[in-house]
Image (cartoon, rainbow, N blue to C red):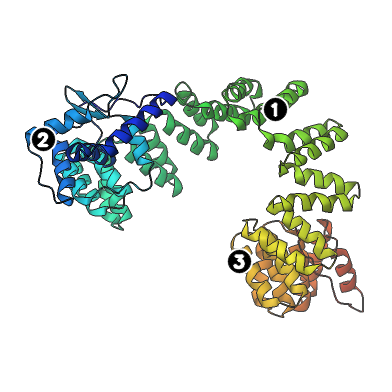
C-alpha cells in the first residue's frame, strides 16, 4: 500500500489553480461530484494515509449524501462523479487524480479546505466508516487523528484493532488514548507491549518517564535501544546532566551525521566541559554557520577562552548583524571587559532605541554607577511604555522610593500580570508600607511557594514583626539555606527576640562577615547595655 505523494511546491500558479478548482466545485451543482470530493477530504482528515480506494470514496460519499436525504450512489453514478472530480482545469491539474491503486486529492486543495475555519467537522459516521475500511496496520493513524479530535470511542476502537493485530505503533497510540482517558494501568500495559514490539515512540516514552523519575540506567538503556539521532540528543543531554561526559560525547558523535545543528553545538559544549576547547571550537562554528543561534554565543565564548578576542568579537558582530540582537548584552559585557566601556554604553543605547530591551539591565548598571538617576528613570519609562515588564518593575521601585505609591502599585501589578513574578515581592513591600499586611502576606506566600528567595526572607521578617516566631523561623531558615545573607541577619533578630543572645550574636557575626549592612549595627546593639530597635534586612530586586 503506497503512501500519498509528498505535497507539491505551492507556487502562486498552484494557488491560482486551487482557486479555480474551488470555484468549479462550489458552483457546479453536481451533487454526486461534490459528495465524492467532500468524501476525499474527510477520509484524509480521518488520518487515512494511502491512495483513496474508489470503494471507500463511494461508501463515505453515500454517508454524506444520506445526511442530505439523498439515496446512495450506484456504481454508474460513482464512476461519473469520480470522472467529474478528475477533470483537469488547466495544465492537467485536477482535484482528484487517478492512479492504478486509487485516487489522490490535490494536496494544496486539501490544505486550503483544512485551513477554512468554517468547513464542517468530519461526521462520526465517516470516522467509523474509515476506521472499518482501514487495514489493522493502518489503524494507528486513524486512532491518532480521532484522539486529536477528542473522539475517544473511535480512537480506542481503531487503536485497539491495530494493537490486537500486533502493530507496535497501534499499541503505542492506544496507550496514549487510554492514558488520556485516565486508564493508566491498561495504558501502561499497552505501552510496555509496544516497547517489546520494538516501537521507537514507546521506547522513547518509557525512557523519558524513567529519566524524569531518576531511573537513569533504565532511561539510558531504553534510549540506546531506539538508536536514532533524535533519541541520541536526549541520551546525550541526560548523560551530560549526570556528569557522564565521555558517554555524552559518544552519544552526540553518533547523532552528529544525521542530526540538526543542535547536535554539533551540544558536542562542542561537552568537549568544552571536558577541558578540550580547541576541539570544541569547530563544532560551535559548524552549528553557528548552520543558523543555530545559541551556537554563536558559545562560539564567541570558546574563542575568548582560546585567547582570540578579535575572532570572538567578529562572532558577536556577525550574530547581532544577522538579527540575533539578544546577544547584544553579552557583547556589551565583552566590550566592558576589554576596557571599552564607552563603546558598550553606546551599544546599549542603540539597542534600546531599536526596541531591544534585553540590554536594559546592563545599561541600567552603567547609568547607576555614573549617578545618572534621571536618565535611569527615563530608560525604565521607555521600556515600560514599550510593554517591558522588567522595566515596569524597575520604574515602580524608583517611584516607590520617591513616595509615588499609587503609580508604583499599578506598574507592579502590570508586571505581575505580564509574568514578571519577582514584582510580587516588591508589591508586598509596598503594601506593608501602607499597612496592608494581610495582602502583603498573601503575595509573599505565593512568591515563596514558587521559589522566590527574596520573598521567602521577607515573609519570615513580616511574620517575625507580627510576633509569629514559630511561623517565621522555617521561612528564614529556608532563605538562609538558599544563600540569602539578609535572612541570616533576620534570623539573628528572631533569636534575639526569643532571648537566645548567644545564637543571635553568632548569626549577626555570620551575616556581617558575609557583607550584610544591617548586621554590624545589630551586633553592636546586642552587645551594648541599651538595645535600641534592631534593623531587619529586606530584599528588593
Q: Is residue 40 visible?
A: yes
- The percent coordinates of residue 219 (x first, y second) are 41, 40
Q: Which residue is mark 3?
A: 446
Disc 3 packing (10 Å; few <14; some 14–19; many ≥20): some
- Which quadrant is home to the C terminus? bottom right
- Percent from the top left, x then y, of residue 155? 25, 49
Which callout, 2 or 1, points to the residue nearer the camera? 2
Residue of label 1: 321
Q: In this image, 172 relative to 474: left or right? A: left
Residue 77: image tag: 2
Which secondary structure, mark 3?
helix
Image spot of residue 75 (x, y percent): 7, 34
Which quarter of the rendering shows the N terminus?
A: top left
Q: Which mark is residue 42?
A: none
Which of 243 and 136 lies nearest the eye of the viewer?
A: 136
Q: Nearer the viewer, mark 3 or mark 2?
A: 2
Among the 4 quarters of the image, the one containing residue 43: top left
- Cα distance in 3D space between marks 2 and 1: 63 Å
Name the secondary structure under disc 2. helix
Residue beneath the point at 67% across and 60% down: 414
Amino acid at each position: 500500500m503506497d503512501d500519498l505523494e509528498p505535497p507539491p511546491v505551492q507556487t502562486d500558479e498552484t494557488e491560482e489553480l486551487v482557486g479555480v478548482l474551488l470555484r468549479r466545485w462550489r458552483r457546479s451543482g453536481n451533487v454526486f461530484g461534490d459528495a465524492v470530493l467532500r468524501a476525499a477530504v474527510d477520509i484524509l482528515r480521518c488520518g487515512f494515509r494511502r491512495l483513496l480506494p474508489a470503494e471507500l470514496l463511494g461508501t463515505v460519499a453515500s454517508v454524506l449524501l444520506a445526511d442530505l436525504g439523498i439515496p446512495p450512489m450506484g456504481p454508474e453514478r460513482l464512476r461519473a462523479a469520480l470522472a467529474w472530480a478528475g477533470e483537469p482545469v488547466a495544465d492537467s491539474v485536477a482535484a482528484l487524480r487517478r492512479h492504478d491503486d486509487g485516487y489522490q486529492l490535490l494536496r494544496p486543495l486539501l490544505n486550503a479546505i483544512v485551513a477554512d475555519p468554517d468547513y464542517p467537522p468530519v461526521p462520526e459516521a465517516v470516522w467509523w466508516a474509515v476506521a472499518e475500511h482501514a487495514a489493522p496496520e493502518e489503524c494507528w493513524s486513524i486512532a491518532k487523528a480521532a484522539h486529536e479530535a477528542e473522539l475517544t470511542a473511535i480512537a480506542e476502537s481503531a487503536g485497539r484493532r491495530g494493537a490486537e493485530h500486533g502493530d507496535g505503533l497501534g499499541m503505542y497510540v492506544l496507550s496514549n488514548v487510554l492514558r488520556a482517558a485516565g486508564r493508566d494501568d491498561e495504558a501502561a500495559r499497552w505501552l510496555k507491549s509496544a516497547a517489546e514490539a520494538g516501537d521507537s515512540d514507546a521506547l522513547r516514552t518509557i525512557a523519558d518517564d524513567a529519566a524524569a523519575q531518576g531511573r537513569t540506567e533504565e532511561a539510558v538503556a531504553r534510549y540506546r535501544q531506539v538508536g536514532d539521532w533524535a533519541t541520541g540528543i536526549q541520551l546525550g543531554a541526560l548523560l551530560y546532566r549526570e556528569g557522564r561526559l565521555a558517554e555524552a560525547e559518544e552519544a552526540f558523535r553518533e547523532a552528529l551525521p544525521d542530526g540538526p545543528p543542535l547536535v554539533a553545538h551540544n558536542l562542542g559544549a561537552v568537549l568544552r566541559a571536558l577541558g578540550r576547547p580547541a576541539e570544541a571550537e569547530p563544532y560551535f562554528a559548524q552549528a553557528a554557520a548552520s543558523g543555530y543561534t545559541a551556537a554563536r554565543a558559545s562560539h564567541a565564548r570558546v574563542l575568548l577562552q582560546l585567547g582570540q578576542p578579535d575572532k570572538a568579537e567578529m562572532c558577536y558582530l556577525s550574530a547581532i548583524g544577522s538579527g540575533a540582537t539578544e546577544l547584544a548584552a553579552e557583547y556589551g559585557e565583552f566590550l566592558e571587559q576589554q576596557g571599552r566601556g564607552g563603546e558598550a554604553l553606546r551599544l546599549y543605547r542603540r539597542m534600546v532605541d531599536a526596541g531591544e530591551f534585553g540590554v536594559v539591565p546592563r545599561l541600567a548598571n552603567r547609568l547607576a554607577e555614573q549617578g545618572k538617576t534621571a536618565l535611569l528613570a527615563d530608560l525604565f519609562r521607555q521600556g515600560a511604555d514599550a510593554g517591558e515588564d522588567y522595566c515596569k518593575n524597575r520604574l515602580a521601585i524608583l517611584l516607590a522610593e520617591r513616595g509615588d505609591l499609587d503609580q508604583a502599585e499599578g506598574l507592579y501589578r502590570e508586571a505581575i500580570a505580564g509574568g514578571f513574578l519577582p514584582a510580587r515581592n516588591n508589591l508586598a513591600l509596598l503594601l506593608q508600607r501602607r499597612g496592608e499586611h494581610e495582602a502583603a502576606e498573601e503575595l509573599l506566600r505565593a512568591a515563596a511557594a514558587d521559589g522566590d528567595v527574596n520573598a521567602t526572607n521577607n515573609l519570615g521578617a513580616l511574620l517575625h514583626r507580627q510576633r509569629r516566631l514559630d511561623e517565621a523561623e522555617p521561612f528564614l531558615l529556608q532563605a538562609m539555606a538558599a544563600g540569602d545573607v539578609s535572612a541570616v541577619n533576620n534570623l539573628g533578630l528572631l533569636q534575639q527576640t526569643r532571648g537566645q543572645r548567644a545564637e543571635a550574636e553568632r548569626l549577626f557575626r555570620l551575616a556581617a562577615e558575609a557583607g550584610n549592612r544591617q548586621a554590624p549595627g545589630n551586633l553592636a546593639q546586642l552587645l551594648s547595655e541599651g538595645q535600641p530597635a534592631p534593623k531587619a534586612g529586606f530584599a528588593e530586586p
